[in-house]
Image (cartoon, grey):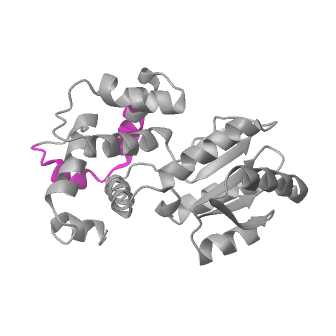
Amino acid sequence: MLNMLVIIENKNIGIKLINKISKENNNIRLYSLCNSIDEAINILDSTVVDFIILELNHKNLFGTEILQYLLKKSKNEYFNSIIAITTQENIHNPFIFDYITTPVNITKLYNSISNICNYKEESDTNLIIKNRIIKILKYLNYDLSHIGTKYLIETIYEIYHKKDYLGDNLKKNIYSILAKKYNKSINTIYGDIKQATKKMYENSDKKILIDFFCLEKLRKPKVTEVIFKTIYIIKKTSLENKWGKKLGANN
């Protein structure tokens, strides 16, 4: 049973939406329905729900404030945990799993909820791996609000689970998976990852980069270097050792 939090301005619309969802999927339980930023943050501070349906539109600010709160508090447990109901799809945020444009297409919403339920039913080990990836990229000073960082996290995650993968044709074998998932072109996925890496380099602590990538002289790391060094650290070392201490984490 997955707990769902619904954050929507009009509670009557929210109730109708919840009733339809409940009839379609018996594996979902409503944790709470709220229509204020304070109420929502109190819940997010006191418990962890499995996923959130969040209204985002230009008429209110609490949806945007929820996203800002999650990012500021570094609540990695909510990475890819939000289905956003919105009038636009250009609000890039690592916590958003999918967008449903208004007026709400119920069939698309059902499909999105089914997909997020499957995603959330990953094993605890896989969720730990994803959190480790996030911590390493955060240590390098990647901007977690950048859409390219979200794609990079998922790229690393995909490669981590492919046995004996040597990095051959990333665009065809990895970026194509994300392109299909997010209905984007392969070049868009790759371009956004490169842009996020460029931004990381410009804002990073250069001593950390030299140490992390074992560089003889300072340069911007390649995307492939970021990917495979992150995987190497996760697979070959314990977070109790050198990098574990630097990252300050036990999982």
In the image: residue 171, left or right of residue 39: left
Point 67% across, 52% down: residue: 25
Whether residue 101 is visible here, answered yes or no, is no
State whether the magenta stretch is mostly helix, strand or loop: helix
In the image: residue 237, left or right of residue 83: left
In the image: residue 166, left or right of residue 172: left
64 or 153: nearer the eye?
153
Residue 151: where, in percent of width, then height?
43, 39
Point 29% across, 72% down: residue: 250
> Could you tell me which quadrant the N terminus lies in?
bottom right
Residue 186: where, in percent of width, then height?
42, 23
Residue 16 sits inside the magenta stretch: no
Residue 75: where, in percent of width, then height?
51, 64
Point 84% across, 58% down: residue: 15
Q: Quadrant of residue 248?
A: bottom left
> Could you tell me which quadrant the C terminus lies in?
bottom left
Residue 188: where, in percent of width, then height?
46, 25
Point 66% across, 59% down: residue: 66
Q: Residue furthest left?
A: 216
> Which segment did they paint magenta?
194-216
**Total marks in image:** 0
Whether residue 153 is visible here, answered yes or no, is yes
105 or 81: nearer the eye?
105
